[in-house]
Amino acid sequence: MVSQTHAVIFGPDLPRHLRRFVAALHRLFPDTVVLLHPGERGSHPFGPVRTSRPPHAMLSTVRPALVLAHCSTMAIDAAAAGHWVASIDFPVGGNALAHGVADSPLRVADAAEAFSLYLRLAEDGAFRLRAAARQQEWLDATFARDGGGLADLLRRVCPP
């Protein structure tokens, strides 16, 4: 689970949504780990849930993990490293172009859906193959040189 309590662009409600999601996920899956952003220093709002500060060693492991994120470039990094990525659809604002780049094709609305997705990825080989193809298409589009993806987002955010 990627934390983004530092990301003010998504409005003041994102930290509350993150806390609730993490608490619910932790009840379903006690091994939940929250990956903190470098901007999140000091204490965190996730109570007893295990956290990781960057660099996140678990993203360097060979065994794929399911990484949950809300419009995060860390999700792109995790997918590129071979992990499953699912975007969390929180009811908050943000930049539509950024969402178009950073949101993965696998989506969840709540912790129960995230846990169900985790189980399905573990148990359903045909689903894993389809999900892997969709995730690779997303990564290919994200890093496309001929328009779209991250290149377009950066050009708009940081014009030459």
Image (cartoon, rainbow, N blue to C red):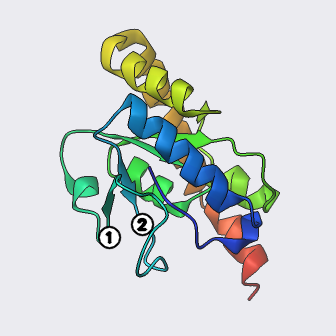
Furthest residue to the bottom?
160
Identity of the amino acid at label 1?
Arg
Discs 2, 1 touching: Cβ within 8 Å? yes
Could you tell whether 79 is left or right of 58 in the image? right
Residue 73, given in percent of the width and then of the height, sits at: 53, 62
Badge 1 marks a residue whose secondary structure is: loop
Task: State whether residue 95 is above or below residue 139.
Answer: below
Could you tell whether 160 is left or right of 124 in the image? right
Q: Residue at x 45, y 71 (%)?
A: 37
Which of the pair 130/43 is nearer the observer?
43
Measure the alpha-carbon separation of dots 2 and 1: 5 Å
Q: Give the labeled residue for mark 2.
A: 36
Identity of the amino acid at label 2?
Leu
Q: Quadrant of residue 27?
A: top left
Q: Give the labeled residue for mark 1.
A: 53
Could you tell whether 64 is left or right of 45 in the image? left
Q: Residue at x 74, y 70 (%)?
A: 9
Residue 8 visible at all: yes
Residue 148, given in percent of the width and then of the height, sits at: 71, 56
Q: Residue at x 40, y 26 (%)?
A: 118
Task: State whether residue 38 is above or below residue 70.
Answer: below
